[in-house]
Amino acid sequence: MDTIWYNDPAFVLLVLFVIPLLLRVPIAICLGLSAAIVAWLFDMGLDMLPYNFFAGVAKVPLLAIPFFILAGFIMERSGIAARIVRLVETLAGNMTGGLGIATVGVATFWGAVSGSGPATVAALGLILIPAMVKNGYDKPFAAATVSVSSGLAIVIPPSIAFIVYGGIADVSVPALFAAGIVPGLVVALFLMGSVYITSVRKGYKGTPRTTSIWSAFKDAFWGVMTPVVILGGIYGGVFTPTEAAAVAIFYGLFVGVFIYKSIDNFKILSDVLVESVKSTAVIMVVVTCAGLFAWVASTVGLVEKGAQVLLSLSDNPWMLLFIINVILLVAGMLLDAISIYYVLLPFLLPLVHHFGWDPVWFGVMMTVNLAVGQVTPPVAVNLYVGAQISQLTMEEITPPVLPLLVATLLALVVIVAFPSMTMFLPNLWGL
């Protein structure tokens, strides 16, 4: 064993990463520290570490991450979220499961604003969970519905996850954005079906209309226009995804300050900036440490060995896809989505090229899988936020999550089985 430790840097890197991870050490420390120790032990040049650390974040596409995070917070504080909720509640009316189905619809729409699962839970949970409970829905079911459907935020464009994947895999971010639309809607439909079945079984109803649909639409018009401005500008060739994120910030400020007048003092703006900086810092520290880990893993041959191990499991592409999805599901229980991209994607990209899979389709499939990871314990970031907002324990919120997870996994099977569905819009728009 000592011989292996001292002669195989790939093995050392893997051990130094996995052991602290199992001891619940923060993922950024596991990634960065294991990479730094291996670089020092095997004389890879410690002077390269600062360069790679800087290179991990010095990428133009990654600028969109803090911009979209800030835009999401501004949209929430500007009152757009509350108005969108009222519009969808009005559309659903008092049909069976109407408010639950509306919750999935709002989360799907908000995914086109936020790009972050936990941020979507935070923005919508404070409004939707009390509303569902008030109308007779079980509180754990309400929290579970908001938490699971908020995972769509990383699938429906604009998506922070797609930005990270595009940077690692060298894939067009606009193409990924376009490819995520149909699969995101498919997942939403499966979730709505699950919510409807549960609502029929338990007798859950929606909210009787207290206002006309037209009045609710007029009130929410500026919010409805948000994804039109962001995505319309990208696909119309007016601006890039990074520039779209900056435009989203100014659009949100315009609506909040001049239209809804909800951002009416500097303290609100200051709070938004502080929360955005904190969220951005967490993500970017993980990105830099994960980038360092990926560089060391590639240098010591861990990537090639991992790819060879996966290829040795089966020559059947469908069987290997099944194995990959199982690995991603397990990884999603332990790591956040961004870390998984940096840790596993270097191993998976050689397989993508080997079997001739479209990297855009593969990225969407991987991202849908990782959306499941946001609600699978022990590292279930969406569930933690949902539990905190609803003042429930993880044990209380988990049982109603299971049927929704099954629905999401069924949608994932459809996405894997029919790649043309994912690639329809990118091909149609020539991306």
Image (tube, grey):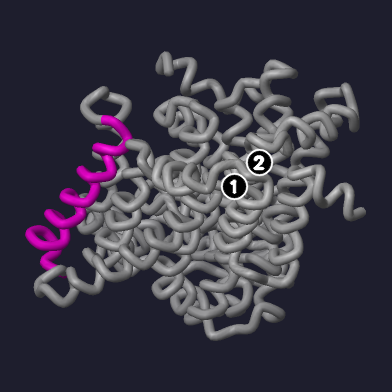
The residue sitting at 66% across, 78% down in the picture is: 394
Q: Quadrant of the C terminus?
A: top left
Seen in the picture, residue 22 relative to 15 is either above or below; the reply is: below
Name the side, left or right, on which 255 lies relative to 388: left
Residue 391 percent across, percent down from the top left: 54, 85
**Which amino acid type is shown beneath numbered disc 1?**
Phe
Residue 340 lies, with reference to residue 415, above or below; the image says: below
Q: Which residue is mark 1?
A: 293
Q: How far separated are the C-alphas under marks 1 and 2?
A: 6 Å
Residue 316 falls in image quadrant = top right
Question: What mark, if any, has residue 94 been given in the picture?
Answer: none
Q: Is residue 269 visible?
A: yes
Above or below, 407 against 186 in this view is: below
Q: Position of residue 339 (x, y in %)?
A: 58, 51
* Span colored in magenta: 240-262
Q: Identify the main secondary structure in magenta.
A: helix
Task: Kindly check if marks 1 and 2 are in contact, taking CB atoms under 8 A apart as contact.
Answer: yes
Q: Position of residue 82 (x, y in %)?
A: 31, 66
Amino acid at pointer 2: Ala
Disc 1: CA contacts within 10 A as few (<14), some (14-19) or many (>=20): many
Helix, strand or loop status at disc 1: helix
| Front residue of this view, candidates 112 and 9 | 9
Coordinates of residue 69 in the picture (x, y in percent)? 34, 56
Helix, strand or loop status at disc 2: helix
